[in-house]
Amino acid sequence: MIVTRVHVITHGCQMNEYDTHTITSELVAGGHELAPSPADANLIILNTCAVRGKPVEKVTTMLGEYRKEKLAGRDLTVGMMGCLAQLDEGQTLAKKFGVDILVGPGAITDILAAIESVETRGESFWSLDFKDDLHSYLTPAPNTLTGFLTIMRGCNHNCTYCIVPQTRGPEVSRSLESILHEARAMQASGVQEIYLLGQNVNSYGLGRPDLPSFAELLRRIAATGIPRVKFTTSHPMNFTSDVIDVLAQEPNVCKYIHLPVQSGSDRVLRRMAREYRRDRYLDIIAEIKAKIPDVVISTDMIVGFPGETEEDFEATLTLYEEVQYDTAYMFMYSARPGTPSHKHFDDMPRAVKTERLGRLIERQKHWSNVRNGRWVGRNLRVLIKEPATDSSFVVGHSDQNHTVLVPKEQVSAMGLYTVRVDTATPHTLYGTVAGQQTEAIPLMMAS
Ligand code: SAM
Ligand code: SF4
């Protein structure tokens, strides 16, 4: 079969979005077309997430459907990439559902060889190697205003609940030259915001005397003059004062920090093998707030980690009150086969986890409402990117990463605007355009 029309379905984090861009760049360079929907494609690639059980269930359902369509005679090749592809769990599913191409997170540049193998020899192709060189995604899609840029791969931490060290391997930092080269290519193509990505960006260059520190790297990216620089994810263990200083000093490095805490209880942090404790985390937050007025801080939290007592959970709630996060990504603990916590600890009843998650979400909504309310009556710089789900609005993100909606008739092009905030909800700010800063790309309105 000749594969010409490819559709990639992306689950999970921004690293996966970046990998999707990389693989689609390779595919286009190799002469393949991108199909606008799975129905138009003869190769569907699932870019998978394995961090929690739910995304795995989703992929299983989709693979089952494609298998049925193939048995019913559809001319279809199925590929799997992303974290699940790297695990025994994913490979068992791939065998069960007759996946033709399987490439792990370190092997996505094998995609053309994989297609060739399926086309010319009719053989399925699996690659799980970690190539030494981190590839570049050098052909940003047209009309892209936010460019994701992976600066490092993998993770050297071993949080007991997390599968990522197994799926993405140990930390490898990209060279400064290749990162700057890619940043300039993005800038030349009209990108207004560069989002630096890594599981733990603060470890960039650690143990590599030939590379700058993450703080220095941030300054180098800021010096390109790109209007905005953001980054994720930071680990409190490696979050150093020099990074806070860069945020405080460089106007185009956004005053937004995502600093996952996971739990407010030292006992739970120890069982999670997070290397910091509550006091250290709060010291970092105090330094950030002292040096960066109006900073926006978000976090990740896990509730119902094995053995978490009511007292431990209350420590998470009191930490929330102390930090007063602008927002939080909150997860029920999901026992992942292959992780130390799955092996050594017993999961707790789902009802307890659900009840605790509900209480945490209630505090998050309260604080997000308070924190978002501070912006009412003030101006924010917003990168308007697309029509909102409610078609009378367009949507974008502020420098501080708020989701901001403005009436669509006030905007004729995507780009950077000054927006006066009129009202705030826990998730969204609503505003009025007070000025236009760049007119990047005509806005395609949904009819
Ligand atoms: N490297 C980042 C860090 O350490 O903060 C985050 C990477 S992880 C893909 C994103 C988030 O998923 C974590 O911060 C954690 O809150 C959550 N997570 C990871 N494993 C989980 C699990 N087994 N159950 C529930 N949540 C999990
Ligand atoms: Fe997973 Fe911990 Fe590494 Fe984050 S730091 S990717 S949570 S092991």
Image (cartoon, helix red, strand yellow):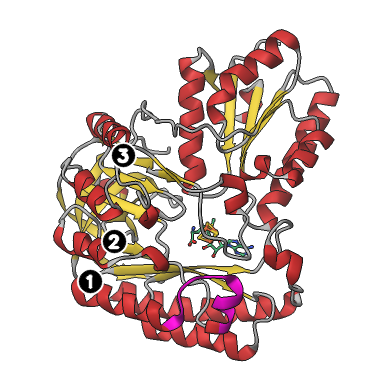
Question: What secondary structure is marked by label 1?
Answer: loop
Pointer 1 with pointer 2, Cβ within 8 A: yes
- Looking at the image, residue 354 lies above or below residue 78: below
Q: Earlier in the sequence, mark 3 or mark 1?
A: 3
Pointer 3 with pointer 2, Cβ within 8 A: no
**Which residue type carries mark 3?**
Leu
Whether residue 335 appears in this view of the structure is: yes
Name the residue furthest bottom: 311
Q: Earlier in the sequence, mark 1 or mark 2?
A: 1
Question: What secondary structure is marked by label 3?
Answer: loop
**Which residue type carries mark 1?**
Asp
How much space separates mark 3 and mark 2, taking CA atoms? 16 Å
| Label disc, if present, on residue 400 of the rendered structure | 2
Looking at the image, which residue is at 25% across and 67% down? 241
Which residue in the structure is indicated by mark 1?
A: 294
Whether residue 427 appears in this view of the structure is: no
